[in-house]
């Protein structure tokens, strides 16, 4: 966490995107991946090597590997071995379905990655699988989690993330207790619902089908903060949805932080990535609402507003601008980091 008074931390990493047909069909996902291959084509593999070489030649030290479901790439093990020897930190973002295979998890661990980020959306198969639209996915993620706990090396990390969704909002506190009680995991990163304005109409999906209004997110976060021993990092949930009293209460809860500064993927400078860059810009779009000019966080460039889709979906929300006085008290719960900007 960074002290905003000393300026935002600068963290630059290269992003490697491996787009394959994903096992999940998450309710919030608007990537056009239905025609994606089950494995990389020769052309895509050449692009992957070009991207990797670009970051290495330009002295990047950290790489994240994401996309749709990168661990499904048939040559992911040798590829990870290669890049883990080239870069100091390799972070993997994947749905985690492949990790139910114990030998595969062992092989992934041996590559020497730094961190692996796995999403989990519910405490039960019914809830999780309803979010990812993939029956049996919860069981695979849980087995994968057990495998990671069993085989990861001392200097390796894993991180669990989730999203506030209409399908799981009532289960989120149960999810926090579940990972704490069953696996001794005491931290969870939770995002506000993700989507671009283009989600409307894609595969019949609508933002309202999964979006959770700020009022419900506020209540869920307050409930989560009451669970002893759990720490949370809430991403892209603006602090102005809380009252001053609620913010002061959250300040007293250890391990609660908020992060609200978007970043763009730092992709290699090739034509093949131009469309992705444009998509990410739309996906990350943020706007200021009518009370932002009264807020100290905007003046201090600590907050960049709310997602455009959230702004539209919460038109009548009574936002609470943060005063400099309140900020002085709650600033330890605000993470300020400019990534790839």
Image (spheres, grey):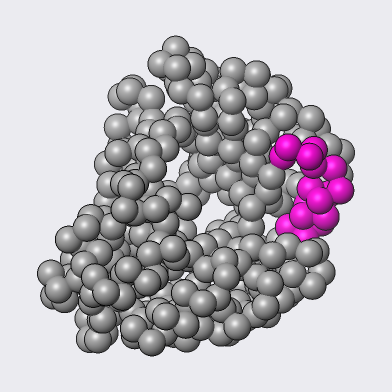
Q: Work out whether 221 lies above or below 105.
A: below
Q: Measuring from the top left, give residue 146's x and y in whole percent.
A: 83, 55
Could you say which is closer to the camera, residue 272 or residue 124? 124
Q: Which residues are magenta?
A: 140-156
Q: Work out whether 72 lies above or below 215.
A: above
Q: Work out whether 60 lies above or below 95.
A: above
Q: Give the residue drawn at x 74%, y 69%.
A: 180
Q: Is residue 271 visible?
A: yes
Assess whether residue 146 is covered by the magenta stretch. Answer: yes
Q: What's the magenta bit mostly, secondary-structure-wise? A: helix
Q: Give the residue drawn at x 30%, y 32%.
A: 274
Q: Is residue 287 visible?
A: no
Could you say which is closer to the camera, residue 284 or residue 332? 332
Q: Quadrant of residue 189?
A: bottom right
Q: Measuring from the top left, give residue 207's x and y in whole percent.
A: 37, 71
Q: Is residue 97 left or right of residue 215?
A: right
Could you say which is closer to the camera, residue 33 or residue 224? 224
Q: Give the residue drawn at x 49%, y 16%.
A: 56
Q: Give the residue drawn at x 34%, y 85%.
A: 243
Q: Quadrant of residue 84?
A: top right
Q: What quarter of the picture does the C terminus occupy? A: top left
Q: Measuring from the top left, give residue 147's x and y in whole percent.
A: 83, 49
Q: Quadrant of residue 72?
A: top right
Assess whether residue 287 is covered by the magenta stretch. Answer: no
């Amino acid at each position: 966490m960074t002290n905003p008074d000393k300026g935002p931390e600068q963290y630059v990493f290269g992003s490697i995107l491996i787009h394959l047909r994903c096992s999940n069909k998450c309710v919030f996902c608007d990537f056009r991946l239905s025609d994606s291959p089950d494995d990389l084509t020769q052309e895509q593999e050449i692009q992957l090597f070009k991207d990797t070489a670009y970051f290495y030649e330009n002295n990047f030290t950290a790489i994240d590997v994401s996309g749709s479901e990168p661990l499904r790439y048939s040559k992911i093990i040798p590829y990870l071995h290669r890049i883990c020897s080239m870069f100091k930190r390799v972070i993997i973002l994947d749905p985690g379905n492949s990790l139910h295979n114990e030998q595969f998890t062992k092989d992934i661990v041996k590559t020497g990655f730094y961190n692996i980020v796995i999403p989990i959306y519910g405490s039960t198969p019914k809830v999780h699988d309803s979010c990812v639209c993939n029956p049996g996915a919860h069981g695979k993620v849980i087995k994968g989690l057990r495998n990671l706990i069993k085989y990861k090396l001392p200097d390796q990390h894993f991180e669990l993330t989730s999203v506030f969704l209409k399908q799981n909002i009532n289960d989120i506190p149960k999810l926090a207790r579940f990972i704490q009680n069953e696996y001794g995991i005491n931290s969870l990163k939770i995002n506000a619902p993700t989507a671009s304005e283009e989600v409307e109409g894609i595969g019949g999906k609508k933002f309202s089908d999964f979006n959770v209004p700020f009022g419900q997110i506020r209540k869920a976060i307050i409930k989560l903060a009451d669970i002893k021993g759990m720490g949370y990092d809430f991403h892209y949930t603006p602090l102005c949805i809380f009252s001053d009293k609620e913010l002061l209460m959250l300040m007293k809860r250890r391990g609660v932080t908020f992060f609200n500064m978007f970043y763009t993927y730092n992709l290699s400078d090739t034509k093949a990535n131009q469309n992705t860059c444009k998509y990410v810009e739309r996906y990350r779009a943020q706007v200021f609402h009518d009370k932002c000019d009264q807020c100290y966080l905007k003046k201090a460039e600590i907050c960049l507003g709310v997602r455009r889709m959230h702004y539209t979906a919460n038109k009548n929300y009574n936002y609470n601008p943060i005063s400099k006085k309140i900020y002085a008290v709650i600033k330890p719960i605000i993470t300020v980091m400019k990534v790839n900007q």
